[in-house]
Amino acid sequence: MRESIFEETAKGKVSRHVLLTILLALILLFTADFLTYIIIELIISLDFWKLEWDSDIVQLIILLATSISTVMLFMWVKFKEKRPISSLGLFKEGALTELSRGWLVGSVLFGACLILTIISGSGVIETVRFTADKLIWFLIFAVGWQVQSASVEILCRGWLLPVSATKYSKIVSVSISSIFFGLLHSANNHVSLISIFNLCLFGLFLSLYVILKGNIWGACGIHGAWNCVQGSVFGIEVSGEPMLSNSLVHVKTYGADWISGGKFGVEGSMITSIVLIVACYWLYQKSNFPYD
């Protein structure tokens, strides 16, 4: 029988106090952010590479450093909750297939948002730069995006979602995970109510996908592709973060922020809201799952 993240999580000594669970998640994230800040400040202070905070290399370091929170979470799960790390939804069976399928889903999902943005007249492809150095940067950043996205998914969908489900219904636990994910971005640059709403919707989509699949490999792939296609393929701001200078294509968005996303990126657009609502409804219907 195929392993399920919810069944395996319930076997551990997990906390049934949701506020303490959320607090621990925040502690892990803030600790990782603090350590990342120290690491980058040390690197910049060396003045060897003449780096600035908004440089592509620093952005790559930030992406990779998110794994700090994952390592800490692994230790918590292993030694405090007394359960295997694989119970976070990281089961070996079909891992590569699910991850690859997730990248396809994530690419198509964001591609739909971008195509509709361009059709609406709120975006245009300015430059295409398929050069050898850009392709190398793309491959490097694809790894970075995957590490960063997997770190978030392991915390939000691999841990917070099923741990919450040990006490509450799946509807409540999905809501907790999705809203937590959305609010994590509330301090980002150029954030808006629409962008927070969209990120909650994206969290909902990923939660439904995890429920459907029983593991988080697909969710990791979807999230990785979603960010990578935005930042490294089309050169769009990712959740308000600076645009990368080494993207394969550069898309310029303009017009009203509610339709283009403004400086937050396409994630802040009502077009993205519509796409994600349709995607969530389709996935909900497809899962045919009891959410009690």
Image (tube, grey):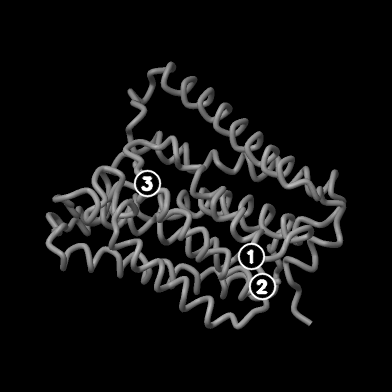
State whether residue 240 is above or below residue 162. Answer: above
Using the numbered discs, state the Cα–Cα distance from disc 1 to disc 3 in whole angstroms.
Answer: 23 Å
Name the amino acid, label 1: Ile
State whether residue 259 is above or below residue 262. Answer: below
The reply to whether discs 1 and 2 touch (Cβ–Cβ < 8 Å) is: yes
Using the numbered discs, state the Cα–Cα distance from disc 1 to disc 2 in whole angstroms.
Answer: 6 Å
Q: Which mark is residue 194?
A: none
Q: Which mark is residue 291?
A: 2
Name the amino acid, label 3: Leu
Q: In the visual, does 9 lie left or right of 106?
A: right
Residue 69 rendering spot, x and y as whole percentages: 63, 40
Q: Which residue is mark 3?
A: 193
Q: Earlier in the sequence, mark 3 or mark 2?
A: 3
Name the amino acid, label 2: Tyr
- Give whichever of 108, 282 is nearer the camera: 282
Q: Quadrant of residue 108?
A: bottom left
Residue 10 rendering spot, x and y as whole percentages: 82, 62
